[in-house]
Amino acid sequence: MATGRLGVGETLEALNAAVGPGTAVWFKETHARHLRVRDFLAPRSALQARFRDGQRPVVFERVLRAPTSYAIPAKPASPGPQIVLHCPALRCNPDTLRLSQLRAVLVADHLARTLCAHGVCVCPVPSVRDPHMATFLQKLRVDWPAAWKSTSTEALRTCVLAELHSDSKEETPPPGVLGRLCLKELVEQKHAAGYDASIDNCLVTEDLLSVLSELQEAVRHRPEDGYPGLDGDPDSGVNGCIVVHVVSCEEAFQQQKLDLLWQKLDDQAPDKQKHLVCGPVKVAGVSGTLMTAPEYYKLRYAQVCKASALKHGGDLAQDPAWTETFDVLSVATIKFEMLSTAPQNQLLLADSTISTKGTKSGTFVMYNCARLATLFEGYQHGMEQGLYPTFPPVSSLDFSQLHDEGEWLLLFNSVLPFLDLLSQTVSLASTPGLHTPVRTEMVCKFLVQLSMDFSSYYNRVHILGVSVQQKSMCWECRGHTVKTGKQEDEPASFSSRNLGHTSSVRCLPVYSF
C-alpha cells in the first residue's frame, strides 16, 4: 500500500467528483466542537474511487503507517521563486512608528518565518540602519537583518535625468529632488492589475532612488542554484523572483508609485510585484493624538505586570528574575492582537486590562508553551539520569496504542495538519492581481485551539509521572536498575507500553513545530 501523505483538498475533490455533478457536498470541517460530535459518512462508491484498496479504515491506516510524512514539509514538484520581502516601515524612526506600521512589520516577520519554514528563499529588505530600530525589533523578537551595504544609485539617476531631459518643461528642483516623472501611461497599461487609476506622476528624490537601488540589489544578487518554494510560477519574471511589499494602508499609494517607477526605469525589474496592504489600527478609548508603537508596547507591558502581580502577589516588575518573562508575555500579547485579525481588515485594539485567565490570547498560548518547555526539560533531565530511555525515532512509534480522545485531538487536529495549515496561509505566487492576501489569523486560531486541547489533556494526564501500579517497582532502563518509589508527579522510567503510548505522542506537538 502506498504511504504518501493525503492532501485534504485532493481527497475532497475526488469525493465530490465521485458523487457526480452539482454543488459540492464534501467540505473540510475545522470547528473543534463539530469534530467531536460528528461521524464521517461517505458513499461506498466515493470512497472506492479515492481509496481503491478499502474504505474508511484505509484513511487511518495510511496516516498511522506514515505519520512522519506529515511532520516534514512536502517537497515541491519544481523550484519556486525567490521572495524579496520589502517592508518600508523599517526605514522609519521607531519613536514615531505608527501602530499600522507596527502591524506591517509583524506581518512581514510572520510571513518571512512561514515562507522559510517551507524552504523558500526569502530576502528581507531593507536592512535596518537605525540602531534604535534594531533595538526595538530585538525587543519585539523580530528577526530582521541589520547589516547594511551601500548601493550605487548612479545608473538610476542617469535614467531619471534622461527621462526628464526628454520632457519639454524645464524646472529647477529643490535640493535632493531630481524632478517629476509621468507614470500615467504605465498606469493605464497596468490598471487591470489593480493599480490606482489616479496615479499621475512621481516626485523622484535621492532617497527614493536609494530605496530602488536596495531593491535592485536584492533581486539581482540571489543564489543561482535555486531554492524550493511553495509553488513554481512561470510568471514570476525572467529572474524567478517575486517582490512582496508589506505596507500600512497609509503607505499603499506611495508604494504603488515606487513600484511603477521601478518598472519605468529598470527593464530588469521583476514582472510580478505583489502588495500586501495592512488595514488601519485603532485603539479603543484613545482619541486625539495617535498612540505610537513604543507607547503601545509600554501599555501592554504595564498591563502584563499588573495582571501577574494580581495573580502571584507582590511587585514582580521590580524583580529582575521576572523581567524577561514579562517581556515575552508582552510581545506574545502584541503579536496575537496584531495577527489574529486578517491583515487586510481594520483592527480595533482594546485598551482594557490584560487577563491571564482567558483562552483566546497570546498569554494563554505562551502559558502552555511554558508547560511544554517544562515537560521537555523534565524529560531531558530524567533521561540524563537514566530514568527515561532516549526518545526513539517517530517512525518507530506505534500509534495504534492511542486510546484517549485527547491524544487523537492533538494528533489529527494539531500535529498532522500543521504544515498544510502553514501552506494555506500564504499563496503569494498563485494569487492574481496586484494585491495578495495572507491569513495570519489562521495560525493564531490554530495555536489557541492547540493550547486548549493540550491544556485539557495536560490537566487530566500525568505525562512524565508514575501510575499507581508503577509505584515501588523496579525498571530496567539503559542498563541501569531504577527504583521508582516516588509520587505520581515525580519523574520515573517508562515501561515499554509507556514508551510507545505516553512519551511518543505527547511529545509530538513540539517535534512537529
Image: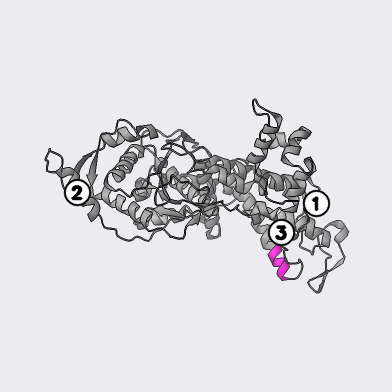
Side (left or right) of 255 relative to 155: right
Q: Amino acid at mark 2?
A: Gly
Quadrant of res 148: bottom left
Point out the residue furthest to the top here. 22
Q: Is residue 155 above or below residue 364?
A: below
SS assignment at label 2: loop
SS assignment at label 1: helix
Prevalent SS, magenta region:
helix
Question: Where does label 1 land, which residue?
Answer: 400
Q: Is residue 311 visible?
A: no
Question: Where does label 3 land, which residue?
Answer: 394
Specify start and end residues of the magenta stretch as a single range. Answer: 379-385
Tell me, yes or no, whether the highlighted magenta stretch contains residue 477. no
Nearest the eye: 38 or 73: 73
The picture places residue 272, in percent across and down from the top left corner, at 40, 44
Q: Are marks 3 and 1 in contact (CB under 8 Å)?
A: no
Q: Amino acid at mark 3?
A: Val
Q: Is residue 288 above or below residue 258?
A: above
Q: CA distance from mark 3 to mark 1?
A: 13 Å
Q: Are marks 2 and 3 in contact (CB under 8 Å)?
A: no
The picture places residue 398, in percent across and down from the top left corner, at 78, 56
Q: Looking at the image, is mark 3 or mark 1 earlier in the sequence?
A: 3
Q: Looking at the image, is mark 2 or mark 3 earlier in the sequence?
A: 2
For label 2, count other residues whose C-alpha is less than 10 Å away and answer few (under 14), some (14-19) or many (20+): few
The picture places residue 100, in percent across and down from the top left corner, at 41, 40
Question: Where does label 2 land, which residue?
Answer: 176
Side (left or right) of 276 relative to 36: left
Side (left or right) of 122 relative to 501: left
